[in-house]
Amino acid sequence: MSTTTNQTNVQLWHYVCPDCGISDGETGYHGQTHMIYCEVCLEDAQHVKLKRWPVDHEPVDHE
Ligand SMILES: [Zn+2]
Protein backbone atom coordinates (compact mmCIF):
# COMPACT_ATOMS: atom_id res chain seq x y z
CA MET A 1 0.00 0.00 0.00
CA SER A 2 1.24 3.46 -0.79
CA THR A 3 0.46 6.73 0.84
CA THR A 4 -0.31 9.63 -1.42
CA THR A 5 -0.34 13.27 -0.52
CA ASN A 6 -3.47 14.78 -1.93
CA GLN A 7 -3.08 18.53 -1.85
CA THR A 8 -6.57 19.08 -3.19
CA ASN A 9 -8.00 17.49 -0.09
CA VAL A 10 -9.95 20.18 1.73
CA GLN A 11 -9.56 20.20 5.47
CA LEU A 12 -12.36 21.92 7.28
CA TRP A 13 -11.86 23.71 10.54
CA HIS A 14 -13.80 24.86 13.50
CA TYR A 15 -12.67 28.33 14.41
CA VAL A 16 -13.17 31.10 16.89
CA CYS A 17 -11.79 34.60 16.81
CA PRO A 18 -10.01 35.51 20.05
CA ASP A 19 -10.79 39.16 19.40
CA CYS A 20 -14.42 39.52 18.27
CA GLY A 21 -15.49 36.03 19.23
CA ILE A 22 -17.02 35.02 15.90
CA SER A 23 -17.05 31.26 15.43
CA ASP A 24 -18.12 28.69 12.88
CA GLY A 25 -21.14 28.07 15.06
CA GLU A 26 -22.24 31.66 14.46
CA THR A 27 -21.43 31.96 10.77
CA GLY A 28 -22.87 28.54 9.98
CA TYR A 29 -19.92 27.36 7.92
CA HIS A 30 -16.57 25.80 8.64
CA GLY A 31 -13.31 27.44 7.77
CA GLN A 32 -10.89 26.17 5.16
CA THR A 33 -7.15 25.76 5.34
CA HIS A 34 -6.42 29.10 3.69
CA MET A 35 -8.68 30.89 6.14
CA ILE A 36 -6.18 32.10 8.69
CA TYR A 37 -7.44 35.48 9.73
CA CYS A 38 -10.81 36.51 11.08
CA GLU A 39 -12.84 37.91 8.20
CA VAL A 40 -14.86 40.16 10.48
CA CYS A 41 -11.74 41.72 11.95
CA LEU A 42 -10.20 41.99 8.47
CA GLU A 43 -13.04 44.32 7.51
CA ASP A 44 -11.84 46.44 10.38
CA ALA A 45 -8.30 46.30 8.93
CA GLN A 46 -7.19 44.07 11.77
CA HIS A 47 -5.34 40.83 11.19
CA VAL A 48 -6.48 38.56 13.98
CA LYS A 49 -5.42 34.94 13.70
CA LEU A 50 -8.30 32.55 14.24
CA LYS A 51 -7.99 29.78 16.76
CA ARG A 52 -8.67 26.70 14.67
CA TRP A 53 -8.99 22.97 15.09
CA PRO A 54 -10.05 20.23 12.66
CA VAL A 55 -13.76 19.45 12.50
CA ASP A 56 -13.22 15.85 13.53
CA HIS A 57 -11.22 16.73 16.61
CA GLU A 58 -11.99 18.33 19.91
CA PRO A 59 -10.20 21.57 20.72
CA VAL A 60 -6.92 21.07 22.52
CA ASP A 61 -7.67 23.74 25.01
CA HIS A 62 -7.69 22.08 28.40
CA GLU A 63 -4.27 21.71 29.91
ZN1 LIG B 1 -12.58 38.69 14.74
Image: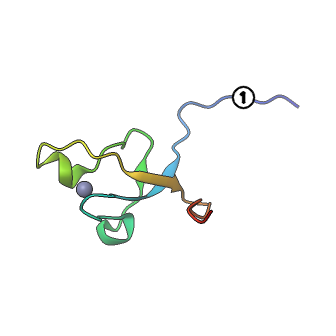
The relative height of residue 3 versus residue 53 in the rendered view (above or below) is: above
Q: Residue furthest left?
A: 44
Q: Is 57 positioned to the left or the right of 27 in the image?
A: right
Q: Position of residue 62 (x, y in %)?
A: 59, 66
* Rendering quadrant holding ligand 1: bottom left
Q: Position of residue 6 (x, y in %)?
A: 62, 31
Q: Position of residue 32 (x, y in %)?
A: 42, 47
> Residue at coordinates 23% horizontally, 50% vertically from top-left?
39
Q: Which residue is mark 1?
A: 4
Secondary element at tag 1: loop
**Which quarter of the picture shows residue 40?**
bottom left
> Residue at coordinates 88% horizontally, 31% vertically from top-left?
1
Q: Is 45 positioned to the left or the right of 19 in the image?
A: left
Asked whether 30 or 51 is in front, the reply is 51
Question: Which amino acid is tagged 1?
Answer: Thr
> Residue at coordinates 39% horizontally, 38% vertically from top-left?
34
Q: Residue furthest bottom?
A: 26
**Which quarter of the picture shows residue 30?**
bottom left
Q: Position of residue 28 (x, y in %)?
A: 34, 68
Q: In which quadrant of the rendered image does the C terminus lie?
A: bottom right
Q: Is 42 positioned to the left or the right of 37 in the image?
A: left
Q: Is 26 positioned to the left or the right of 54 in the image?
A: left
